[in-house]
Amino acid sequence: MISIQEALNIVLKKDYSVDSEIINFVDSLHRVLAEDVFSDINMPPFNKSAMDGFACRMLDINNELELIETIPAGKIPKKTVGVNQCSKIMTGAPIPEGADCVIMVEDTKILNNGNILFLKDKTKDNICYLGEDITENQKVLSKGTLIRPQHIAIMASVGKTKVLVAKKPKIGIIATGSEIVEPGNVPNQSQIRNSNAYQLISQVKSLAAIPNYLGIAIDSEEDTYQKIKKGLEETDLLLLTGGVSMGDFDFVPKIMQKAGVEILFDKIAVQPGKPTTFGIHKKASIFGLPGNPVSSFVQFELLVKPLIYKMMGCNSALPELFLPMKNRYERKRSERESWFPVIINSEGFVETLDYNGSAHINGLGPANAICRIELGKNCIEQGERVYVRPI
């Protein structure tokens, strides 16, 4: 068996990429930039007021100021501010010529003669200067950025309405096992509903990739072979769930090899997910994930997600936090690294859940993270810091 880190290194060693395409920037959320983005203008594009107030000369702030103009946002000043003069100005409006500061409206008083009196001794300039945030031709977003709402706003501010992004990789999904029935069917005493495939479909969608569900492969070498062959031909990455352990009908690794897959590993020293298998084919890579739903979920998070991000050229690191445990956690066996579902609470502590093992999908429901306990370690004490990965 190899460690999970060794497995990840193997998965990411090969060069993977998908093509790129130009799309409207408003449709690029959760996509990955395939180009650098530069500003076409200075931001701000002019010296502007940072607040509502009166634009004047700093030398004159302790004198009565004659009001000569009102400047709303979006309008160009018409008058130059001279000695002991001011213009009423709104937030975001251009600073008039002659003025070098803005006094806040709440710090002023309008006198009976209509002049303005500043009620304090000094002020900041309260001006946002041309180009102080972004200069023309400055790079504002880098290739490989996973696009989030704030990046959409940046693209809008620099006029980047068409953007080059990585195409969505196509991820094939096959559930295996004659005991599996689709969720709309009522299982008999020897059957279970197919939760794994729909869990994987959702995990794939959360990465802005395209799931291609190829159905259930029954416990038949021919049916499994045909579905694997079809998946390798039609997708960039193929995920199978079930059929990779040591049972009489767990022949997925053998069928992978028959389909032309070079298997790079088939056991990992991790819990859950020991029988996780990974291989490469001339057309696509392939994972054989365990049949237990929590195992499948966790191995997607640890191995499949980083691979999909690499295929899209994403340079965003997956977050991993180092937080204190709220309560003591103990396990009986420690010959493998373990990941288990937890909650990161509002106080920043890690709380364990009622979790019975890799088949307990309902135990994963309340979780917002998975927690790591190292190989050889049986116990995490209350208050001890642990690595957790948000999910």
Image (cartoon, helix red, strand yellow):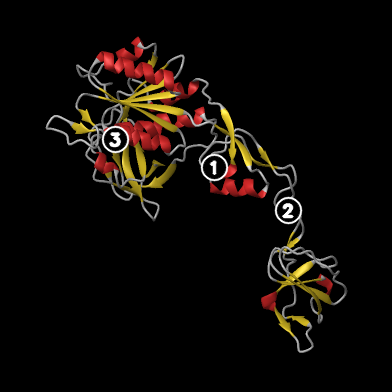
- Residue at image x 84%, y 72%? 59
| N-terminal label among 1 and 2 | 1
Q: Is residue 222 above or below residue 321?
A: above
Answer left or right for 124 relative to 342.
right
Mark 1 nearby-residue class (10 Å; few <14, some 14–19, many ≥20):
few
Tag of residue 132: 2
Residue 2 placement (x, y as % from top left): 36, 21
Q: Secondary structure at mark 1?
A: helix
Q: Amino acid at mark 3?
A: Val
Label whose residue precedes the other's in the sequence (1 or 3): 1
**How far apart are the two marked residues, 1 and 2, measured between alpha carbons?**
29 Å
Q: Quadrant of residue 252?
A: top left
Task: Give the quarter of the figure containing the C terminus.
Answer: top left
The answer to which image quadrant residue 126 occupies is bottom right
Circle 1 is placed at which residue position? Answer: 27
Establish if 196 lies above or below 230. below
- Going by the numbered disc 2, the residue's amino acid type is Glu
